[in-house]
Image (cartoon, rainbow, N blue to C red):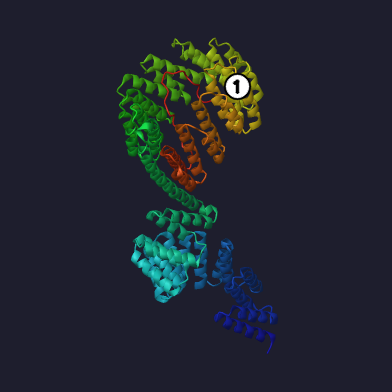
Amino acid sequence: MTDGQDSRSHTDRGIELHNNDDLDGAIAEYRTALRLNPNNVSAHNRLGNALQDKGELDGAIAEYRTALHLDPSHAPAHNNLGFALHTKGDLHGAIAELRTALRLNPNGKEIHNNLGLALAAKGDLDAAITEYRTALSLDPNYFRAHHNLGFAFQAKGNLDEAIAEYRAALRLNPNNAPTHHNLGLALHDKGDLDGAIVEFHTALRLSPNDAEAHYNLGTALEDKGDLDGAILEYRTALRLNPNLAEPHICLGNIFKALGRKDDAREEFARALSLLPDTPANQDKIKRVEKTLHEVAANQDLADARNILEEAKKELLAISANDSSLQDSGLFILAETQAEAGDFIEAKRSAELIGTERSIPSALRQIAAIQIRNGDIPGARSTAASIKDNWYKRQAFDYIAEILAERGNIREALRTVEMIEDPLSRDTALKEIAIAQAAAGHIPDALKTASTIKDQKAKAWALRMVGVAQAESGQLQDAETTIATIEDEDARAHILIAFALGKVKAGDVRPAQEIISSLNNHKWKAWGIQVIAKRQAKQGDTPGAIKTASILEDPAWKATTYCRIAEVEAISGHRKEAGDILQEAVNIAASARASLKPNLLLDLAAVQAKAGAVEKANHTLAMIENEEWKDIGRVRIAGAQVDAGDIQGALSTANTIDGIGSKGSAYLSIARAQVRAGEFPKALTWSHTQEPALLRAPILLGIAMGKLEQARGEIMSPLPSRFGDCFADPTLPPD
């Protein structure tokens, strides 16, 4: 027998072994055939097929190319090379090879089928459908073409055609699990849940370890309402393939619906860990992250509401001897319930407050929270329910102000129309004008101010419009704006704003000259402080100190040093802040006795912010009144909380004598504990604390912390009291 005959014999033996799924044996025979005859085109092609079936694509492609090098017109090798290139992801190369194969063999049904697969993978479904139909015209009983045509129709959304092709394929091959699986998917998409479930069960009977089929059966059962069955299928899918993310997502959604929040969080977190961070997955990852946050937020919100109920019971148990502390607690409770969205409960808590004027004050706070959260009708309704005209006016003012700040002038003016009292209407219009000016809409602000009838309210509005103009460098326009106001304070105010604008632009000397021209001592001192603070914020601390040294009054100078030190502390320059504060303490020692306690409290708080807690306590020791000292310790504890030193804050709080002040410190500490992930520890602390006067503020702090966790942000503070509308001004934030 010749080498050529031996080579063909080994090739035939390889084909036989390959047909019996003995890939290693087949490969050995093909290699033997090629050793005997390296130019055996069939052996190269067949070896390529065996290597491809074994997953060795590079080796297979090399064999197909060798076969085609020996015989460029070998259509089977072009077909097989095209299929291998498709599998490897080279769709352009695959389509080129398959088209070459068709030129050589136009009636090759497998070639048409393979070309259809490559075109479908490229996204050209219409061309793919044409190729599958051509394959079926050559052989109507070609199972693969029916299956693939069904898949293409399904991808196009032509479900009826897809179902028909899958059924045609199954008539030819009833035991093909993937076709039953795909038919189940098409039926599910069409809304035939019962039919889909039957097909998924059939697919799993034929291929019990198909994780995808278990997952898809789970989705059909879930849509049918069989949650227990769905959970079982999702868990089975994950047991078979722990790297699937989708079953975790579905389990998370079921557990979320069932209220099993911890289980839901665990499933969503697991899904996120499994989803590849690829561009194609970004939308899905964002959706899962959003849902995970919602689950956690809902649980935190539920926790907060439960704890608020517990806090309410503790507050109501407080004896009549401590009614003022009870009222303070109920006030905070009402605010926090409103922050949690429980406005009805918040109003009920407000009505329980014993101090008559505190009830309208609490309702005003509730209205403020409602408008801040975007509930315009609710805020207006709450404001309208306030019986005290002063607090009602403040509530409507705040609603109008917030709406104007957010650019919703139309609703702000509608709010004004709802106010019956003429003075209250004017004060609300004043707030709108100020908000417009702050946003840079000066003509609109002037127009709004012109509609104000109350001269005091109009003067204030025009003054603040002038301040906005002056700070932006338009001093002449500002003076024109306030020309009709017979108030020297207004001119001083806009000059300080103009000076502040100069400092922001780096022109400190002209700013100092402007301030020096002021006749009123108070305004001049205030202007110097404003300039010094801005210099510090801009990084010119030596310049700020130099500006502050101009001040002669010890109280103003110490306060200004304190503001500079505060900026340094916030910037992380603790040593520099400490040195400035020590100088401020020395200056404060010579301040008037009536001003000294406030000065020392302010200094101690900033010292604590700068990390100098021991020095802060030494500063407090200079205060004689014990109640003032307690207030200072509350501030020190707050600074420690802000710095993350919860244990240090607790140590400081425990030195406070007054129950009310200690409760305030405990509230801040509990709130921080929850934000730091120490919810169980905070809850245990509240339950072991005596007396009830201290348990209540801890519970309120825990509830606040939970609300902040639910929102993913620190709650914006509301003013604990609203100053009189015509009180001495403060400059806009600089």
Task: Note whether 487 is above or below 561 in the view shown.
Answer: above
What residue is rendered at 43% in x and 76% in y? Answer: 175
Q: Which residue is mark 1?
A: 532
Position in image of residue 164 (x %, y %): 37, 68
Secondary structure category for the residue under label 1: helix
Viewer-proximal residue, 420 or 602?
602
* Quadrant housing the N terminus: bottom right
Q: Is residue 540 visible?
A: no
Q: Amino acid at mark 1?
A: Ala
Position in image of residue 633 (x %, y %): 53, 31
* Quadrant housing the C terminus: top right
Position in image of residue 219 (x %, y %): 40, 62
Position in image of residue 524 (x %, y %): 55, 14
Q: Is residue 655 visible?
A: yes
Task: Note whether 332 is above or below 496 in the view shown.
Answer: below
Task: Give the residue at the far bottom of this rendering.
Answer: 1
What residue is rendered at 46% in x and 65% in y? Answer: 237
**Left or right side of 723 for 95:** right
What residue is rendered at 62% in x and 76% in y? Answer: 47
